[in-house]
Image: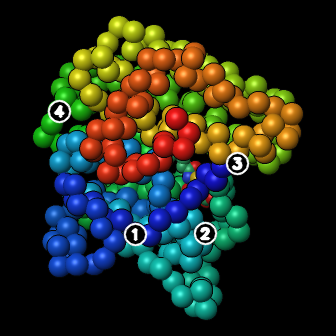
Amino acid sequence: MVECTGLENQQVRNGLVGSNPTPSAIIIKMLEKIRVFSYLPNPRVWKSMITAKLGEVDIKIIGDKPKNLSNWLWDFDALKIDPAKLDQIEDYKRVSKRGFKGALYKTDKFLEKHPFGTVPAGFNFDGSEGIFESNSIMRAVARLSKDKSLYGDDDAFKQSRIDSFLDANLVFAREFQVYVLEINSLNKYLYKRMQSAYLFYLDGIEKALSFDKFISGNTITIADVSFVCDLAQFLRERDNKQLIEEQGYELISKNFEKDFPLSLKHLKDLSKKHEFKEIMSNYLDKIL
Ligand SMILES: N[C@@H](CCC(=O)N[C@@H](CS)C(=O)NCC(=O)O)C(=O)O
């Protein structure tokens, strides 16, 4: 399982996904309300892309395959650099922190707006605000939408309940990130932590879905979007069945279908919706 796997640049505007700078892409640039720089494809970016589709928000996605991001200058105006010219931006050279190896090139401005230095990196339309953490970038997209139901109808308690699910989701996703990055050298401690984070999160989601049609109430919200993207990414653990078993462990998600039927149905139903399907395409096909 690779934490950072990639596609070429993607631009999305109200359902339009493309990779070439066509005349319509120029219009997209002028209209974008939010910009995200990341390695691609990235389920963490899908959260914002799907929310943008559901909420009809103009979003611009800039990025490249993970292995190529070390040849990019990380900035609001992110640029692909000719590897032969990287010495010209030596001042911006930084040691990567997690998920990447070696050097990355991040401008001072990037680090001012993104103090943790991570991608996905979100920006408002002119780059004067930086938004980090995929759930928060997704929240910004939802806040920009006219469809307020995606993020609790401007009701403080409904919004906070959605935040509660997003916080629970982040704990699961963070544990998953560590698990994936160490998948070649598992140990008991790490495996148990992942297992208990998985069981804790899905137990709560299963319970929530036994009361309501969606995770936080009876309409779709960003809690559902985040659930789909992070759980889908986690289930790709199954791509590494052999590697996990060779180390004496079994797939943590082995009994997912049996143990969490409501979560399974929710994941499948949502991933068939066109706003999800256009972004995730057949990501789940091999594993469910
Ligand atoms: N929880 C964060 C995770 C972001 C993250 O850890 N990104 C890593 C790549 S997987 C990164 O940008 N690392 C930059 C570095 O190594 O300096 C989110 O959901 O956005």
Q: Residues within 10 Å of mark 2 (few under 14, many from 20)?
A: few
- Spatial separation of the CA atoms under disc 3 and disc 1: 24 Å
Q: Which residue is mark 1?
A: 9
**Of callouts 2 and 4, the N-terminal one:** 2
Q: Which residue is mark 2?
A: 67
- Residue furthest top in the image: 211
- Spatial separation of the CA atoms under disc 4 and disc 3: 36 Å
Tell me if label 3 and label 1 are in contact, CB under 8 Å: no
Question: What numbered label is drawn on residue 166?
Answer: none
Position of 228 with respect to 236 (left or right) is: left
The image quadrant that residue 9 belongs to is bottom left
Q: Label 1's element?
A: loop
Q: Label 3's element?
A: helix
Q: Residues within 10 Å of mark 1 (few under 14, many from 20)?
A: many
Amino acid type, label 4 = Lys
Amino acid type, label 2 = Lys
Q: Nearer the viewer, mark 1 or mark 4?
A: 1
Q: Nearer the viewer, mark 4 or mark 3?
A: 3
